[in-house]
Image (cartoon, coloured by chain):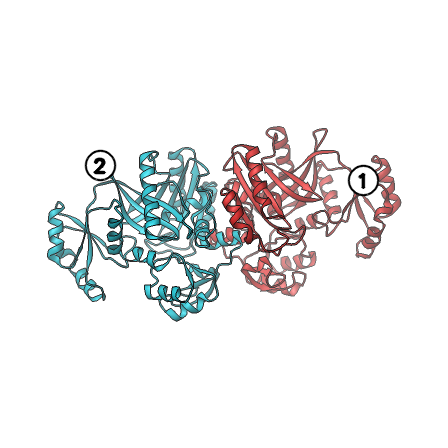
Chain colours: A cyan, B red
Amino acid sequence: MMVPAAIELGVELRVLAEADGMSAAIAADRVGDYTDTATVLDFAKTVDVVTFDHEHVPQDVLRALVDAGVAVRPGPDALRYAQDKLLMRERLSELGLPVPDWARVVAPAELDAFIAEHGGAAVVKTPRGGYDGKGVRVVRSAAEVSEWFTAAAEDGGQGALLVEELVDFRRELAQLVARRPSGEVAAWPLVETVQVGGVCSEVIAPAPKSAGRLADVAADVAVAIADGLGVTGVLAVELFETVDDRVLVNELALRPHNSGHWSMDGATTGQFEQHLRAVLDLPLGGTGTHRPWSVMVNILGGPEEGQLVDRYAEAMANHPTAKVHNYGKQPRPGRKVGHVTAVGDDLDDVVYEARSAAAVFQD
Amino acid sequence: MMVPAAIELGVELRVLAEADGMSAAIAADRVGDYTDTATVLDFAKTVDVVTFDHEHVPQDVLRALVDAGVAVRPGPDALRYAQDKLLMRERLSELGLPVPDWARVVAPAELDAFIAEHGGAAVVKTPRGGYDGKGVRVVRSAAEVSEWFTAAAEDGGQGALLVEELVDFRRELAQLVARRPSGEVAAWPLVETVQVGGVCSEVIAPAPKSAGRLADVAADVAVAIADGLGVTGVLAVELFETVDDRVLVNELALRPHNSGHWSMDGATTGQFEQHLRAVLDLPLGGTGTHRPWSVMVNILGGPEEGQLVDRYAEAMANHPTAKVHNYGKQPRPGRKVGHVTAVGDDLDDVVYEARSAAAVFQD
């Protein structure tokens, strides 16, 4: 999704893709292993700035690029907080930002103690490698994640897991901002994200009933994180709005993020264009919205048989104002294979339009 | 500009480019001569539908594709009216559509007679190959285009030129529509186009003071042309609004057109997405606007030295809501190298924003 933004701006985008035929390979100049320093260094020689569409490039590869004089944006110092949730919690706590109660636990007894202190349940997370609900589990006893302690110990780290209080939240929100190396930061409206089974299902922009204090607090928190971590590019801050009206930071992503896809059709500057502007240290674009409401619904899984394009005729005939985005991935259960965005003046209408258009692509 | 739309829809776009390094070659699968039947036929074997970004593919090449069973959209029967202005005038007259007085002239005496009957001046056009003011001349005597008669005679045609009355117009308008093979037609709002030296300088959408009869007439005319000519894809109808409140058809383009670039940032469905939907015979997208006004200003020529990107920092810092489109072409005097679009609620503000942002790229 960064390619269209690059084309419009006349920015030449070169892609190091993991494998041939991946969606990223639509503009792939090279296929190679992003965990191999020599491969990435060699690729980096052909460009002015390196950025990423996920956080899993190893720190030693990133640092080798920096040592070789490559502009890496976001840089390894910022990216490690998206790569390691324990480091992220430590750093956000240092910055005085609102986070759930948390602890670093290396032994089942420590975890059981935390659970006992927090009402008999807690959320355990593997510090590294989790996404879309993977590596996250609600437990009432350390015995439920005993294999995670074993795996963490074997992972070369110090065998630590992250445990967090089970936050009693009213809803989940996300605040996207972009920051350029010179320090300029731009924030989109705060959005509400609806999760189903740990996976984002839909996003409403702006979050209903968020004007005023809530929007201000969320923007302040995200800007403080962007500045405090020295982020370059798009930063997505996933938040809990608690039942007692607090805002707590849940997760971070240092890249264009699912919670910002609505901006491609609903805002003056979409998140992929903004990410490019930020990593190229260009002035950031306006983050206002075209219409009062934008709703994005993920296409999860897609049709049981066939491809998304097989449903285009039905979806487009019945939903002429919905914007369909097809990632070109083979449908399979649970996989994000596309999304649909609708915009308009009446929230109920916009939600209905986006959901019903997306539903055409699901069995 | 069709590539980003194709990527979002997951449509695989293959490009036959004239030469390596052209902007089209950003996604070029093949470089070759579009006037060579064997080259185009061979390329066409790799795709489901063939379309064009200009009207100059020869009729014999187009007909060879059709004969080989290739879906050519728009097809040669429709395209020839965009390729030959005499044919276009004849056909529109047959359809009873409003056109300036015109005649087919093969001799200077015929032209002088037409001029004498039309107030002492007329517009002479070469039927084929003209664009952006080329091949169009206002004359008071046939002697002013004597070399055109000679060239037309040598062109293998019957040596004919097109002569038209010099229309006393208030302003120029353009009506864009899209039509799919099954017959569905969608019309964007009527726009005003401002020409400088025969080249489009800016476009205002919708055309000021066009609501009601004017918009209805323009849309009716464009739909009648799309249906009458069997157009597939985007059709741009350039119109004169005369001082006596008539609407006359000036020129046609059977492709996404400069007068529709505003739609990429200002309408629910941009013209490149709509063209793809139309030529793929998919239901057409909504043509409503995000905001009351959209203004597109062409970047003509660009900076005397350097590239458009050298001016990005200044343009983006001062005009954060303007959308900059860079065609990746080498700047040279008079060349369209990009455009800027602004949208908003107040026409004066939007015009100012678009013009001043575009001005940053001009010396």
The residue nearer to you, when weighing A4 against A180, is: A180
Question: x, y percentage for residue B299?
Answer: 61, 47
Mark closer to the observer (1, 2): 2
The residue nearer to you, when weighing B180 against B237, is: B237
Question: x, y percentage for residue A302?
Answer: 37, 52
Question: x, y percentage for residue B71?
Answer: 58, 55
* Protein chain holding label 2: A
Judge whether residue A257 can be spotted in this image: no
Mark 1 surroundings within 10 Å by alpha-carbon count, few (fewer than 14), some (14 through 19), many (20 or more): many
In the displayed structure, does residue B202 sit left or right of residue A148?
A: right
Q: Is residue A61 above or below residue A185?
A: below
Q: Are marks 1 and 2 on the same chain?
A: no
Question: x, y percentage for residue A288?
Answer: 44, 39
The residue nearer to you, when weighing B26 against B317, is: B317
Residue lying furthest bottom in this view?
A38
In the displayed structure, does residue B311 sit left or right of residue B125?
A: left
The residue that label 1 is drawn on is B122
- Amino acid carrying label 1: it is Ala
* Protein chain holding label 1: B
Q: Secondary structure at mark 1?
A: strand
Spatial CA distance of label 1 from label 2 is 78 Å
The residue nearer to you, when weighing A86 against A173, is: A86
Residue lying furthest front in this view?
A182
- Amino acid carrying label 2: it is Asp
Residue at image location 59% in from the left, 62% down from the top: B21
Q: Are marks 1 and 2 in contact (CB under 8 Å)?
A: no
The residue that label 2 is drawn on is A244
Judge whether residue B340 can be spotted in this image: yes
